[in-house]
Amino acid sequence: MSLTLEQLNSASPADAAQMLDGLYEHSPWIAEQALNERPFTSLAHLKHAMCEVLAHAGRDAQLGLIRAHPELAGKAMVSKTLTAESTNEQSKAGLTDCTPEEFAKIQKLNADYNAKFGWPFILAVRGPRGLGLSKKQIIDAFERRLFGHPDMELQECLRNIHRIAEIRLNDKFGVAPALGHQVWDWQEQLAQHSDPGFAEVGQLTVTYLTDAHRACAQRIMKNMRDCGFDEVYTDAVGNVVGRYHPATTGGKYLMTGSHYDTVRNGGKYDGRLGIFVPMACVQQLHQQAKRLPFGIEVVAFAEEEGQRYKATFLGSGALIGQFNPAWLDQQDADGITMRAAMQNAGLCIDDIPKIQRDPAQYLGFVEVHIEQGPVLNEVNIPLGVVTSINGSVRYLCEVIGTASHAGTTPMDRRRDAACAVAELALYMEQRAAQDGDSVGTIGQLQVPNGSINVVPGRCTFSLDMRAPTDAQRDALVADVMSQLNQIAERRGVRVKAELTMSADAAPSAPEWQALWERAVGALGVPLFKLPSGAGHDAMKLHEVMPQAMLFVRGENGGISHNPRESTTSDDMQLCVDAFTHVLNQLTTELS
Ligand SMILES: [Zn+2]
């Protein structure tokens, strides 16, 4: 018999604690304390309450919880003294049936890990989809985390414990994130297509108009048709468009979507999550034979990452009339022009201007995206409402000093170009941190033709500065550039700085951001707002219509543009639920 939230909310404290028994290994106090927060509006609400209890319990209690866990494939498993929950999880991951070599390897990792950190390695072995990680995935995670910083590793163990509890809780309540699983599975299928050179080594790379890219378009179109979209087509730049008609003809459309191209050796969720989440919503509407007073247009953008050609945001840019014909003559690494690639794909270049949308026919644009950062992961909150896509500025700079003998030039007579840049780097680090949500990066830093025994006479470097508003960004840039000039003056070196990119911030439209805020609140998820440090397709649509984005938490410290990028099907389910809530709000507004 599965539990219900109503039963949990109305039970006596002792009975309620009994209902939640076993969620946290040998640690009933976590659920017991969380029960003080009753009544819970959702399981997400309960999960967060338990996260909060542990977050405030202090390091000793946290360590006690971690140490209450058995080793993976350890002595307790062999002697069959694991809790029932642990036995189930370890056997689902195939750990109860290791080869002698695998078993020996895991024993060694257990010993090394314990010796380094002083607690057992904790991994939610049922994984982000709940099906169980492979033994290879488990061993890889083990080996990687052995090199973690102890403070970070402690937190990573606690996050894995919360994930274990989440799955146990779902089992108790007999709930499965069915639509989250569906979205997960679509992404897994799409990740089967990868460009040559990467596919062979199991890496995901899908760049503009390659065979793998076109196979992805085909698969997305098939999925859209299966979901019940009324119109499905590929447009003149390779965007896949699915339209679900409104209740009455002439109704406006809500536009949504994200990109299906990837960076080289990227993750499976970047971009694609924002295509499949609204698809799952349309599938639901179609199954219920439901029409809304507005249509839904899901666009799978063909190109966002600028990998094969330097034409970032090509897909979403084309929808607002920003396709630059000069791009057609650009060549990829093999000398194939974009024009030839488009012709080979059967795209009609002459039609590109025709795909520009008339904003009057749209309500606005929303985009769901994996966070691509560590923030939501750290605070244990599955969804985040985006306040603004950061404005950014990039410079390529050069400091020119005097190259001189490293042995004979006294420290007080040097014109060291690299030291000047080092001083700037440290200044920018603290100046950006001062704002709280600005970022500044020197991603490229070279001493051209430098030698081990020569004081650097030249130093070239890049500057990348971003902030949620243009004013905040401009103030940061002004301070950094003025500091650069002061450093140069004091050190007697010269500076050249070339502005290579400037993009305005795209603050969320307040009423659209409020739609996401209410949706997140209705799910019982605490409201967490954050700016987007990365650029997204929504930035382009921002130029012609109101937009707002929703972020979903990434696993593994929120890493992205990396094969370890991940999120759980539970979090994806919350995303689908939030999106559905936004559709319901818009329906109410328009009725
Ligand atoms: Zn993306």
Image (cartoon, rainbow, N blue to C red):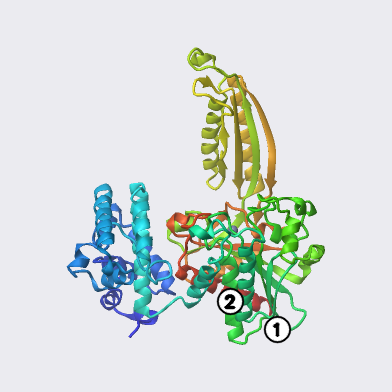
Q: Name the element at disc 1.
A: loop
The answer to which of 37 and 199 lies nearer the viewer is 199
Mark 2: which amino acid? Cys
* Residue at x 34%, y 78% (from the top left corner): 172
Mark 2 against mark 1, which lies toward the viewer? 2
Q: Position of 333 compared to 103: left or right?
A: right
Residue 37, image x and y in percent? 37, 69
> Which residue in the protein does label 1 denote?
247
Residue 289 position by quadrant: bottom right
Q: Is residue 133 visible?
A: yes
Residue 14 position by quadrant: bottom left
Q: Can residue 61 be seen in this view?
A: no
* Residue at x 27%, y 64% (from the top left corner): 99
Residue 104, image x and y in percent? 24, 58
Mark 1: which amino acid? Ala
Q: Name the element at disc 2.
A: helix
* Residue at x 60%, y 65% (from the top left corner): 514
Q: Position of 421 compared to 376: left or right?
A: right
Question: What label sits on residue 522 in the rendered view?
Answer: none
